[in-house]
Image (spheres, grey):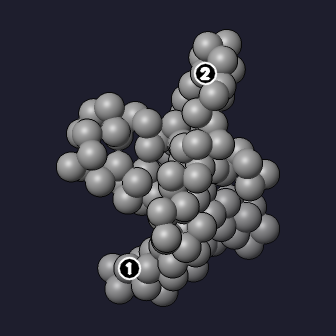
Amino acid sequence: MYKNYKYLFYKLYKLFLRINGETGIPEYTAMLVVAQNFFANLLALYIFICKLFTGTVLLRFINNWTIFIYLSVFLVPFYLSLVFRSKYKKIVNEFRNESKEQRISGKRSVILYLAISFLFQILSVLYLLL
């Protein structure tokens, strides 16, 4: 599972490197996207579970400050595992020698994962509104 997580980071890093270059700090952008997606998926799962078992979702405690605090708490482990002490360079080197077929398959897997995650997040919001 950790390898998949690193691969997702690697593909996003390469994407942001291609879009913005080194000046766009692609390692931080990729880390933020991975962390945001993970946080949003957990929030969507929370919504589904609460709504399914209790019929209501406790969102009173969720405001701008709690979201900021939760995201900050989430960012620390992501930062430590992906960026701190140039760990992203080791991750890039780990996947650098993939073949063309592996690269195409990996790109499809990442796109599929992100699309399913986004759909899950949208469905949780729609389920919340029911």
> Dot 1 corresponds to which residue?
68
Please indicate, yes or no, whether residue 26 appears anywhere in the rendered image: yes
Rate crowding at label 2 as few (under 14), some (14 to 19) or many (20 or more) other CA atoms within 10 Å: some
Q: Secondary structure at mark 1?
A: helix
Residue at horizontal 44 percent and vertical 79 percent from the top: 72
Residue at horizontal 47 percent and vertical 41 percent from the top: 12
Image quarter of residue 99: top right
Residue at horizontal 27 percent and vertical 33 percent from the top: 19
Answer with mark 1 or mark 2, whichever residue precedes in sequence. Answer: 1
Q: Amino acid at mark 1?
A: Phe
* Residue 51 horizontal/vertical position (percent): 67, 64
Using the image, determine if residue 96 lies above or below residue 53: above
Instruction: From the viewer's perspective, tell me whether residue 109 is left or right of residue 70.
Output: right
* Residue 23 horizontal/vertical position (percent): 21, 49
Instruction: From the viewer's perspective, tell me whether residue 84 is left or right of residue 64.
Output: right
Instruction: From the viewer's perspective, tell me whether residue 66 is left or right of residue 99.
Output: left
How many numbered discs sit on the rendered protein? 2
Q: Secondary structure at mark 2?
A: helix
Using the image, determine if residue 28 lies above or below residue 54: above
Rate crowding at label 1 as few (under 14), some (14 to 19) or many (20 or more) other CA atoms within 10 Å: few
Mark nearest the camera among 1 and 2 is 2
Please indicate, yes or no, whether residue 128 appears anywhere in the rendered image: no
Instruction: From the viewer's perspective, tell me whether residue 62 is left or right of residue 91.
Output: left
> Dot 2 corresponds to which residue?
103
Q: Amino acid at mark 2?
A: Arg
* Residue 74 horizontal/vertical position (percent): 53, 74
- 31 and 72: which is toward the camera: 31
